[in-house]
Amino acid sequence: MDPQVEQQLAPLRARCKDQGDIVRQLKESGAPEVDVKREVQELKNRKKELEDMILSLSPTDTFDRAKMNDLIKRRFFYDISFAIYGGITGQYDFGPMGCDLVDNMLAEWQKHFVIQERMLKVNCSILTSEVVLKASGHVDKFADYMVKDVKTGECFRLDHLIKQHFEKKLSEKKTSQEERETINRKITLLDGMTMEEMDRIVKQYDMKSPLTGNDLSDAMEFNLMFPIYIGPSGNLKGYLRPETAQGIFVNFKRLLEYNQGKLPFACAQVGNAYRNEISPRSGLLRVREFTMAEIEHFCDPDDKTHNKFDQVANTEMMLYSACAQMDGESPRKMTISEAVRGLGLPSLGLLSTPMEVGALDFFLRDRSYILGHEPSQADVTVYKALEQPPPKHLVHASRWYHHLGSFTHNERLDFRGERSSIEQLTGGRQKGLVANETLGYYMARIQQYLLKIGINPKKLRFRQHLNNEMAHYACDCWDAECLTSYGWIECVGCADRSAYDLSQHTKGSGVKLCIERPLKEPKMVESFIAVPDKGAIGKAFKKDAKAVQEALAALSNEDAEKMDKALTETGEYDLNGYKLTRAMIPSFKREQKKVHVEEVIPSVIEPSFGIGRVFYSLLEHSFRVREDDDKRTFFSLPAVVAPIKVSVLPLSNKQEFVPFTTKLADALTELNLLVRVDDSTGSIGRRYARTDEIAIPFGVTVDFDTVNNVPHTVTLRERDSTEQVRIPIDDVPLTVKKLADGKIQWKEVTDKWPRFIAQETTK
Ligand code: AMP
């Protein structure tokens, strides 16, 4: 970045870093979670301050959202649903252009992931039974906070309401400086507040409904799922699925069988998901119904290597690590191999062998060999400070001083700065930035896909979740974020969800969702087993008796102990909704068994695409205005995703033109290319402009030379450069096909055929 800009950013970076250090210290000292949360929130606020400043100082982007929206509306890419009745926010209908663009994005997704990675596919029910979403945690936890207008019942998302109220106050002249400061402070803390804290603010400032001025209810939690009742009786409660992933998890057993019991394998699903967002906003970015494309990659929890990792190892990516966010640093470009394998140095906290200390010495003398990430500036500063004994009251530093001092100079010299991985240096105690190869592999593949469909590489980064952003079960999570006029937007999530989902559904259904892994040596294990009275169970549960027996057989030792205790103490036990009594399970027994396999719950790596968000970012990234005419706007979409691949434009509507136009359009269609014939009377320039607007990458013009001269030739034009060549009409279909499939580039066409200047004949 420009040094002057860096100078302006330096104080903001330092503020992040100071706060990051506070968070680290609190975590290290085992401070209470509320304190950590508060400071993490402050860290996020400072990070946002820094990012806003970076955006405001970057070279001005001339993107004009109003202009783009006008084009989107005029050429019906998409529009608000039920517009003739006034529309509903958060719901959109896609027109012909939007549909084709989404279809092409998904077709490319299918090729890039499902076909190339040989994934399995499923298409599961959208109407989802409550038990499934109870087990996944969505029924209890998938919620936002809101308040209601007590008279009209209108709902407001709590954080949005408070922010709006405060912003209004800030705009009023009568608000004192002191009040402004308090309000600003509260706005920055809003993101991490609990419901009770926000509720107190609503009451303290006597906030009313912004629409009617009526009183507001107490704050409440609002589950974002759409509840439904399946069937006419209304007895079976369910929800519209809030994500497609659960359909894959509940089918794991069948999928594993289909895959002959082998790991790893991945399964993909594309379909709509539904979230009852309290206040949808920012166009397609926050809606209530959207298409997701999700992949669940199941692998051995102890082996997350990926056999194709080497194929992507050199992919360069812009990574914004949690550490960099905490230190107020910028995202960094590095190869995914460096990010996963961590070619760099261990951080000070992990130095414990002479070789590791040697590595740091080496670094301090000569940075040149560093290939991956470097130790943070904080580490270097502390390490340098340790050359002098630190004052005794700095207990932590003193400990390090003595520890590092215990290695002799010669011992340290053993390290010569070879390209060792951080994992080798620390004996596996510190790994790279990205948790494992499989996660890294998918991150690289996600990037390749996004670039292929036309996402601007300069407006793409992968941001690692901070510890408290990540679901408690996830061990690492990176979001592919695209920069848009709304800021950086999460478009694809990529998480290592460990064994969480399959464990939850194993508990919820009583069906073991695991694999059997051969043991190196057989071992004896003790099982605690329920011995049921089959007759009593059959009598009590009739057709469900088999399911009860299976659930009993699948009980873990721990659950069997719990059941025995409950039956003794209360006489009853609830097993997945079946009420069991002592008479049904008269006894339990302990058994020693020699086992040759162990049951292991696979880990899940999940790339999850919000297709609408990728679609919108793609439109922003490819929106262009012609330099010589600011009314001529168009989308510069790559041919692979452009809805219509080629236009055919006869220069005259004379009868002699018709056979040429028809034959050409038919030959192009025969190659599965979507063609638009525009034989309207407008000037050719205006017709080109119309085809550019809907992103048609190639245009063929049939002119008087085509009709009059032999061999018959036409012009072929490329949208972005507006360059044209003269080409025999019979060569057009295959050339366009190759261009549209990305098999050849436009340059090859201009190298092969003469540039077109003007027609020889005009009648
Ligand atoms: P999540 O399961 O919340 O991580 O969401 C997965 C992906 O779905 C995100 O990366 C977004 O791209 C997309 N997404 C989530 N919520 C919405 C929404 N309300 N509207 C549009 N896209 C969304």
Image (cartoon, rainbow, N blue to C red):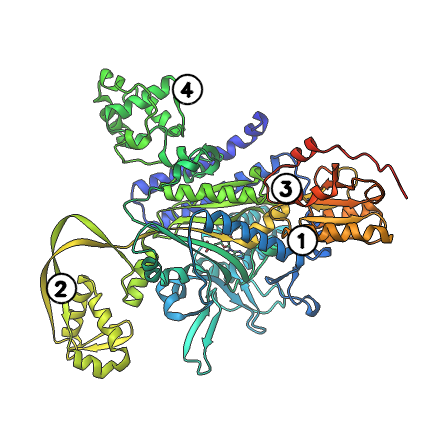
Residue closer to the observer: 42 or 486: 486
Write the residue at 17% across / 62% down.
557
Residues under labels 4 and 2: Cα distance?
60 Å
Residues under labels 2 and 1: Cα distance?
68 Å
Residues under labels 3 and 4: Cα distance?
44 Å
Look at label 2 and name its amino acid: Phe
Disc nearest the viewer among 3 and 1? 1
Whether tag 4 and tag 1 are in contact, CB under 8 A, the answer is no
User: Mark 3 or mark 2, which has the lower sequence index?
Assistant: 2
Q: Is residue 43 left or right of residue 77?
A: left
User: Mark 3 or mark 4, which has the lower sequence index?
Assistant: 4
> Badge 1 is on which residue?
669
User: Mark 2 or mark 1, which has the lower sequence index?
Assistant: 2
Q: In the picture, residue 386 is in which quadrant?
A: top left
Residues under labels 3 and 1: Cα distance?
15 Å
Look at label 1 and name its amino acid: Thr
> Badge 2 is on which residue?
528
Look at label 3 and name its amino acid: Leu
| Residue extending farthest front | 710
> Badge 4 is on which residue?
368
Write the residue at 40% across / 29% down.
372
Percent from the top left, x then y, of residue 65? 68, 48
Element marked by disc 2: strand
Disc nearest the viewer among 2 and 1? 1
> Dividing the image into 4 quarters, which one contains the N terminus?
top right
Q: Is residue 57 left or right of residue 630?
A: left
> Badge 3 is on which residue?
739
> Dividing the image into 4 quarters, which one contains the C terminus?
top right
Q: Quick check: can you spot residue 260?
A: yes
Within 10 Å of the Cα at label 4, are there few (<14), some (14-19), or many (20+) other Cα atoms?
few
